[in-house]
Image (spheres, helix red, strand yellow):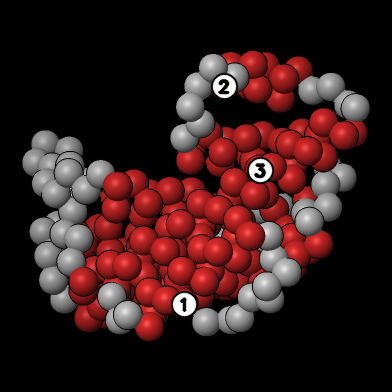
Amino acid sequence: MNQLESNYPSLIFKPYENLKAAKENNSEAERHFTLIELGEALLVYVAGILLGEYKKSGVISKKIETELYRLSNKNLSFGHYQHLVRLIHKEMHDSIIHDKLHESHNYDGAADFVMSFDILKKLVDEGLDEGFAEKAEATKKGRTAKKTGFLEFFDCFIRVRNIKAHPDGKAGPKDNLRKWPLTEEYYAYINDHLEPALMEIINDLEILSEF
């Protein structure tokens, strides 16, 4: 795991410290929880920066203002933050992190994570409840991961997060849904792909350490 300097925002650095503790405890379930916590913190912080930049610019976007009004009386979900990041990024082109969020900016670790999860999801939907690493890695052989940027990573991250939060009905075909197998084996496999992807993005966004 790449090391983060303590000058990163506490909103991000604290979950990172929790992740290090979880790894020392050798609990994949705890490690997964802290990875989700770290990913959530990163997206919320990025949303905050973009919103702050938008307000500071003095430029009025009807699309952004309409969405902010629509969300003003809601308890924001993680999906709402992702939606705001995508919207503000699309409407503003002079953000300090605009290039990092652009679809042309590829993250190799994120690409591997998305491909690994998509393959695993298909296998679990077909009935797989164990042997995740062996089956998924065998299926991956010969495949090339698609270019994956910040927003595409978080689209997949949200799916993984929602499985952890609400596993019922997350596996199987639509006419025969079942509970997702939240086992240590599952956590170990997805963690080993999620962690390097998340750390790659955080380290690439080192400018966050200045805010």
Amino acid at circle 1: Lys
Query: Residue 187: x and y, percent?
Result: 28, 69
In this image, 83 relative to 136: left or right? Answer: right
Above or below, comparing residue 56 to residue 163 in the picture: above
* Residue on which the image places disc 1: 20
In this image, 187 relative to 103: left or right? Answer: left
Q: Quadrant of the rendered structure where residue 194 is?
A: bottom left
Q: Quadrant of the rendered structure where residue 54 is?
A: top right
Above or below, comparing residue 1 to residue 82 in the picture: below
- Precedes in sequence: disc 1 or disc 2: 1
User: How dense is the environment of label 3, judged by Cα within 10 Å: few (below 14), some, or many (20 and up)?
Assistant: many
User: How dense is the environment of label 1, judged by Cα within 10 Å: few (below 14), some, or many (20 and up)?
Assistant: some
**Residue at left offset 11%, top offset 36%:** 175
Closer-to-camera residue (127/192): 192
Query: Residue 35: x and y, percent?
Result: 44, 64
* Residue on which the image places disc 2: 71
Q: CA distance from mark 3 to mark 2?
A: 14 Å
Kindly state the secondary structure of the residue where label 2 is placed: helix
**Residue at left offset 32%, top offset 80%:** 25
Query: Residue 98: x and y, percent?
Result: 78, 51
In this image, 124 relative to 193: left or right? Answer: left
**Residue at left offset 34%, top offset 46%:** 162
Kindly state the secondary structure of the residue where label 3 is placed: helix
Kindly state the secondary structure of the residue where label 1 is placed: helix
Amino acid at circle 2: Leu
